[in-house]
Amino acid sequence: MFLIDDVLLFPVRSLLWVFKEIHHAVEAEQANEADAITAKLSELYMMLETGQMTEAEFDAAEKTLLDRLDAIREGEDSGEEEDDEKEEMVVIRKRGQ
């Protein structure tokens, strides 16, 4: 009985695995983007200190980068909440079986 279930559900589980891998790849890319933004902010501070950039240019560039960094971090926070909800649903389903 369980063998038949495994065979029949294999395509669904395979698709689920593919989607999970895509999700992990996107998360890794967002983490890399956050690191790149942090490095760019450091460069901006250095350019301001050395006089290569005016205060107004710095403020505009900093605001753009900080807004993007906040958006990435908000996305990570909501993703953690979604993962918690999914785990709760799995537990509930297993209890129901």
Image: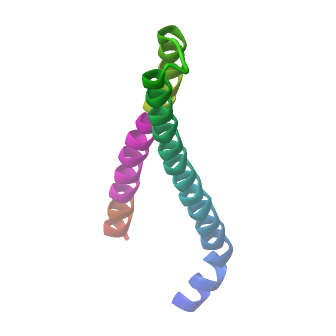
Q: Quadrant of residue 15?
A: bottom right
Q: Is residue 88 visible?
A: yes
Which residue is pictured at 50% across the width and 34% down the height? 43
Name the foreground residue: 27 vs 87: 27
Tell which residue pokes out farthest to the top in this image. Answer: 56
* Main SS, magenta residues: helix
Query: 5 above or below 62?
Result: below
Residue 34, horizontal then vertical, whole percent: 48, 42
Name the foreground residue: 45 vs 39: 45
Q: What span is in magenta?
A: 73-89
Residue 67, horizontal then vertical, whole percent: 48, 24
Which residue is pictured at 41% across the width and 40% down the height? 78
Tell which residue pokes out farthest to the front in this image. Answer: 50
Q: Identify the image quadrant of the N terminus.
A: bottom right
**80 in the magenta segment:** yes
State the scheme by which the image is colored: rainbow
Name the foreground residue: 95 vs 83: 83
Name the foreground residue: 60 vs 26: 60
